[in-house]
């Protein structure tokens, strides 16, 4: 049985210091997560999710089954090869914005 | 609150110190609960992570807060371990060398203080990442390039102080450091180089030496002070850029290839910190290992040949680039082709030949200083993957390169690991980065890894090879391999340590340098 958190495996990130602004979740995701989790080849988080769970759930921003709590847990605690993101990297408000954005309803693809 | 205490500090003393630190930085920037402390551990730990944790974390903002936190630590005899972005993965991540050390997280200090387009440099604080500076330069329309390591999420200053390397012509990154500010254990703030002149405004980041002893180097890979800002010189965008790949079919080819690279590098025909990558490094980024080998132990030769065919690469794969006006690049390309064509089976590829190739794509970005995370994908070589770095230096010499490769491959294979590595070429030396990939959840693998790296360091030292950088767990061992003259070098470092930090509060154990009263 797959772990419940497996689909979130690598809520990767990639730097960015945004402590002074409060941009929306999509912008934060683009700056902090997309280099690992965007669609297409060359993104380690997406590649891991393809191996573990298949291509249908590999691209986080295209998923409709994520909830804020699971996103927050993955960001703050890390998962598999993805290390945690600390409060000095992403504030609680920023993590919340990313989680809200990822878990928002999306148009059916 | 965590029950862990700094060594030799009582619970009461520690609580008093944290209270004082909260008053300086604000209560929200001192972390002492278990979840936060775990977030500062080594995410790629192969030993029990619970024996190498911070006792707490303080995250000051600005020079005044940093010096006041240092003063509190000094008053309470609390050792501190400074991190910039904490992404030193494969070498210990953000964990301290000594269990119970207090971590000083400088990530909040993330200002790009200056970009000088004309003189081509930037001045950054510790928390500025490669991605951040790259993005900033593009946003302001700058024509300057940065140099970046393969995962671009790390900090410029921290990586530079570890003497990390990249892939552009500015790949020996610390070579391009110019000016730094350092806080010493007694609270003294030092601006080095030209900035030491009272009122100096010009030249601080164009001439690094100033007058008198040049001291910046002693603050790299050391525990003599905490660097709070640094100047980094940047490469002007060249008029042309042509990445290329040359593949070589046999393991032994690393010898002639390295010999051929030497004159091309020394004469700047190949200007960048080029890299000769092993097959496994190529494969791990883009293939699923289980499709080639499901058993324990290293990949057999037949599987490696299949991977070569599937990826259309070689046992060794040399990535470099040409930079400059078209006629210059044309002329250099001819010289390069003529050189490598002397190796039987050499194949040449340009960007047009490798469209859609993930590895060529991210190497193309790296050699023009564009940060990305693609190489982090080597960790997909196995579930829950991690890696560490064993990184001996080699002269650009074929015989040495082959010997180091054979040594590392034999030891890795004997302990059940694939050889995954690359030689990053400077002008006269190569960083041989061996990156064994292991599963974080496989206790047996983690145990074998410790034995293996211990052996790698010892066997390399017997042949006269030393590492340029080491993981926390092997810092003492590596320092011990530089023991000529009755440990004269380490004794000198210890004398400097005791002069600058007599109570030993700065990063005890960093690079094997311990205060008198402490040890590993």
Image: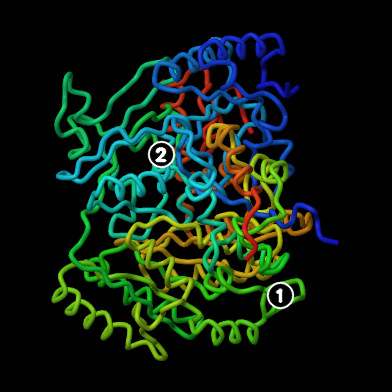
Which residue carries the number 2 mark?
Answer: B128
Residue found at x 16% / y 74%: B326
Q: Residue at x 86, y 62 (%)?
A: A1
Residue for point 40% across, 16% down: B64
Q: Determine whether the residue tagged by mark 1 lies in a helix, strand or loop.
A: helix
Label 2: element kind: loop
Of residues B350 and A1, the one drawn nearer to the viewer in this rendering: A1
Q: Residue furthest bottom?
A: B344
Q: Position of residue B407 (x, y in %)?
A: 56, 68
Residue depicted at 54% across the width and 72% down the height: B406
Tell me if residue B123 comes above or below residue B295 in the rendering.
above
Q: Can the viewer see residue B481 in this picture?
A: no
Task: Describe residue B292's horizontal placement relative to residue B182 as left or right.
Answer: right
From the viewer's perspective, tell me whether residue A59 is left or right of residue B222: right
**Residue B36 located left or right of residue B263:** right
In-image side of B267 versus A4 (left or right)? left
* Closer to the camera in the image, B190 or A27: A27
For label 1, the residue is: B290
């Amino acid at each position: 049985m797959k772990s419940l958190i497996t689909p979130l495996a690598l809520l990767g990130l990639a730097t960015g210091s945004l402590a002074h602004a409060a941009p929306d979740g999509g912008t934060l995701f683009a700056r902090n997560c997309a280099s690992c989790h965007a669609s297409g080849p060359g993104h380690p988080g997406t590649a891991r999710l393809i191996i573990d769970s298949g291509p249908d759930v590999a691209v986080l921003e295209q998923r409709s089954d994520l909830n804020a709590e699971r996103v927050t847990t993955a960001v703050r605690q890390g998962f598999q090869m993805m290390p945690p993101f600390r409060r000095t990297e992403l504030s609680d408000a920023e993590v919340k914005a990313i989680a809200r954005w990822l878990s928002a309803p999306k148009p059916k693809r | 609150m965590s029950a862990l205490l700094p060594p030799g500090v009582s619970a009461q003393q520690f609580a008093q110190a944290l209270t004082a630190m909260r008053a300086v930085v604000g209560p929200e920037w001192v972390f002492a609960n278990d979840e936060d402390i775990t977030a500062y551990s080594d995410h790629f730990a192969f030993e029990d992570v619970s024996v190498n944790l911070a006792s707490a974390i303080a995250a000051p903002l600005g020079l005044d807060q940093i010096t006041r936190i240092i003063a509190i630590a000094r008053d309470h005899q609390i050792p501190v371990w400074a991190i910039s972005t904490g992404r030193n993965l494969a070498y210990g991540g953000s964990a301290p060398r000594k269990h119970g050390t207090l971590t000083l997280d400088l990530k909040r200090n993330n200002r790009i203080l200056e970009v000088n387009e004309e003189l081509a440099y930037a001045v950054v604080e510790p928390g500025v990442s490669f991605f951040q500076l790259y993005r900033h330069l593009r946003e302001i329309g700058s024509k300057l390039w940065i140099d970046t390591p393969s995962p671009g999420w790390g900090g410029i200053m921290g990586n530079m102080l570890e003497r990390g390397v990249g892939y552009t012509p500015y790949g020996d990154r610390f070579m391009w450091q110019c000016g730094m500010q350092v806080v010493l254990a007694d609270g003294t703030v030092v601006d080095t180089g030209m900035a030491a002149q009272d009122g100096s405004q010009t030249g601080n980041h164009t001439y690094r030496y100033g007058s008198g002893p040049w001291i910046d180097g002693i603050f790299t890979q050391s525990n003599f002070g905490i660097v709070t800002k640094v100047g980094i010189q940047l490469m002007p965008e060249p008029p042309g850029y042509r990445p290329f790949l040359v593949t070589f079919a046999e393991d032994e080819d690393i010898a002639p290839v390295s010999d051929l690279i030497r004159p091309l590098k020394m004469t700047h025909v190949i200007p960048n910190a080029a890299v000769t990558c092993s097959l496994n490094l190529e494969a791990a980024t883009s293939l699923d290992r289980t499709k080639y080998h499901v058993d324990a132990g290293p990949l057999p030769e037949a599987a490696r040949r299949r991977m070569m065919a599937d990826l259309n690469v070689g046992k060794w794969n040399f990535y470099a680039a040409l930079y400059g006006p078209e006629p210059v690049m044309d002329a250099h390309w001819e010289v390069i082709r003529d050189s490598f064509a002397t190796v039987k089976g050499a194949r040449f590829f340009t960007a047009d030949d490798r469209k859609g190739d993930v590895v060529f794509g991210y190497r193309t970005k790296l050699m023009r200083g564009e940060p990305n995370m693609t190489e982090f994908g080597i960790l997909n070589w196995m579930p829950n993957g991690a890696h560490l770095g064993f990184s001996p230096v080699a002269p650009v010499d074929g015989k040495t390169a082959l010997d180091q490769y054979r040594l590392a491959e034999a030891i890795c294979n004997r302990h059940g690991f694939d050889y995954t590595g690359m030689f990053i070429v400077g002008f006269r030396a190569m960083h041989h980065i061996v990156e064994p990939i292991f599963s974080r959840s496989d206790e047996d693998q983690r145990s074998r890894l410790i034995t293996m790296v211990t052996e790698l360091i010892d066997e390399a030292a017997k042949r006269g090879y030393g590492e340029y950088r080491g993981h926390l767990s092997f810092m003492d061992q590596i320092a011990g391999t530089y023991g000529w003259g009755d440990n004269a070098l380490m004794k000198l470092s210890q004398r400097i340590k005791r002069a600058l930090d007599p109570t030993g509060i700065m990063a005890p154990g960093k690079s094997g340098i311990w205060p008198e009263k402490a040890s590993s």
